[in-house]
Amino acid sequence: MKILAGSAVVLPGIRDRAFGRGAEKFVFANNTLYDTLDPHTVFDASRVAVRFNLYDGLYRYVDNPPKLIPWLAESHTVSSNGKAYTFKLNRNAKFHDGTPVTSLDVVYSIERIIALKKGPASLYLEAIKPGTTEAPDPHTVVFNLASPSAIFLATVPDILVVNRAQVTSHEVNGDWGEAWLARNEAGSGSYVLDRYEPAVGWAAHRFVEHFAGWETDPIEELELRTVLETNTRVLGLMRGDFQGADGSMPYDQIRRLRQSQEVQIIEQESMRIFLLALNHRKPPMNDVHLRRALAYAFDYEGFINNIMGGSVSRNPGPIPNTMWGTPPGLKGYSFDLDNAQAELKQMTEPLRPLTINALAGFNDSEQAAVLLQNTIRKIGIEAEIEVSPWPVVANRLANAETRADIVPIFRSTFYVDPNNWIGEGFGTRYHGQRSLSYYSNPTFDRLLDKALVSDSQVERRHLYEQMAQIVSDDAAGIFIYNTRWYGPYSRRVAGVRFSPVNSGQDFRWVSMKS
C-alpha cells in the first residue's frame, strides 16, 4: 500500500468503522497533533495514547502512585552482578496480525530504538550496546547491560515491542521502517489501528484476542481526535461529542465543566512539573546571573493563585514534591525584582532580546510566557514570544541551535525515578531532545554517575538531593509548580485507571454506560 505524505491511512476492510461511522465510539479530544504513530520516535505525554493503546511493553505502569505490573513479560530475574536482566514472555501474547510475540521481536525493538536515537533512546544508549541483547529461545530475552543500572527496570515499560517481520518488510534504505511506521502500526496492544490522518487523529477497534483479557463492557471503538482550541474541547464534552479530554485544561474551564450534567471531573495527584526550560547554549543564557535574574522576575504566587486559580502546588525544584530525591525545605526562588536587578548588574555577557517559545493549546505555557515577558520588561529585558504546536516545539528542542532561549514546558512522568526529571533534564549525558537545558556542571555529572549505578535507594536519595540543590543554585531552570490532574470525562464513562505515567489515557480499562 503506497502512502502519500500527509494523506489519511485507511486500512483495508474497515472504512465504515473509522471517523464517524459504525458503532458508538469513545472519542478523546487531544490538545496536540498526532504527527507520527511510531512508538520509538515519539516520547511525550501529549501523544501517550499511541504507546498505551496500540503497543505493549514487557512491564506496565498502572494506578497512582504508579506501580509496575508484568505485561508481555510474566517475570524477570537479575544476575548477581546486576548486568543481565532475563525476562520470560507470556506465551499467549500475539500481534494484531495474529503472529506470536517472541523474544526476537523484543530484540529487534531495542535494537531499533538504539539505532534510531530518538524518543526513549537516551534511556538505553549507554546501558545497552547494539548486538548484546539475546533471545536464547522464543520466550526468553536477555538484556546484557554494559554496566549495572539503577534505572533500567523502571524504564523497561518504555521498550515497546513491534512486530519484527512486519516492520522489516517495510524498511527502505535501512530506515528501520520509520517512514512506514510513522503512519501505520505493528503492535500487540489493546486496540488495532483503523485509520490515521495527521491533521485529524486516529481511530482503532478493540483487539479481542489481547493476551491480558478484558473487563466487562470495554470500549469497542476508540477515536483520538486533535482539537487544539480549549473552548471547542469544553463545548464538545458538554454536548456529548467527546467522552474524554486531556487533564491539563485551564482551571477556569474545569470549573465550567463541573457545572455540566454531562461531565465528571476525576481528580488525582500528578507528578508533572511545569517549568521554564532555559537554553544554556545560547549566550547570554549561559550567564548564571541572567538566569537568576529571570528566576527572581517570575511572579510565582500571581501565576499559581490568579492564572491557575490555586489548582496547583508550588514546586520550587526540578523533582516533584511527591517524589523522593527532593531536598527537604528547598526554597527555590521568589518574585523579587530588586534581587533580579542586582543579579543583572553582575552579568558579564552582553544582554540581548530573548526568545520564548510557548506551546499552542496549552494555556499554562502561553500565559507563563506573557507573564514573564511583562515582568522582565520592568528590569530592562525584552523578549519575543512565539506560540507553536507541540510537535514543532519538540523538533526544535532536539537541537540547541533551534530551540528558543526559554520554553514554558511540562516535564511528565515516563518512569518512576528521580532521574526521570533531574537526571535527564540536566545531565550532560542526556543532551538532546530529552534535555531541559543543555546544562553542564561537572559536580552534578559526577553525582549523577554515582546515582545511576548505586543499588542503595538511601544513597541515591542523598545524591539526587545534592543534585537538586545544585540545579536550584545555578538557576538551571525556573521551576514553578507540580500539576494536579483534573480529568474531564463523560458521566457515562467508568473505569478510568489514572497513572501519572499514562495520563489517564490507557483506555483498555475504560467502559461506557449506554
Image (spheres, rainbow, N blue to C red):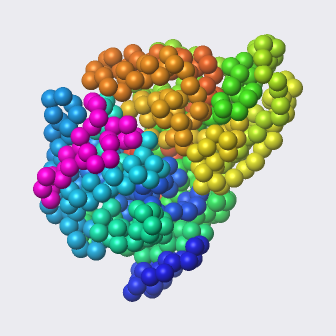
Vertical placement of residue 206 versus 158, above or below: below
| Location of residue 191 (image quadrant) | bottom left
Q: Of residues 94 and 14, which is closer to you in this image?
A: 94
In the image, residue 41 lies at what x, y percent? 47, 55
Q: Main secondary structure of the magenta part?
A: loop
* Magenta residue check for 140: yes
Rendered-image quadrant of the N terminus = bottom left
Residue at figure coordinates x 42%, y 46% from the top left: 121
Vertical placement of residue 265 versus 353, above or below: below
Rendered-image quadrant of the C terminus = bottom left
In the image, residue 418 lies at what x, y percent? 42, 29
Residue at figure coordinates x 63%, y 22% from the top left: 475
Q: Of residues 365 and 460, which is closer to you in this image?
A: 460
Residue at figure coordinates x 57%, y 73% from the top left: 5
Vertical placement of residue 28 versus 434, above or below: below
Q: Is residue 195 visible to us here?
A: yes
In the image, residue 167 lies at what x, y percent? 36, 67
* Magenta residue check for 419: no
| Location of residue 441 (image quadrant) | top right
- The region drawn magenta spans 123-148
Determine whether, in the image, residue 112 is placed left or right of residue 211.
Answer: right
Residue at figure coordinates x 81%, y 37% from the top left: 383
Determine whether, in the image, residue 163 is placed left or right of residue 103.
Answer: right
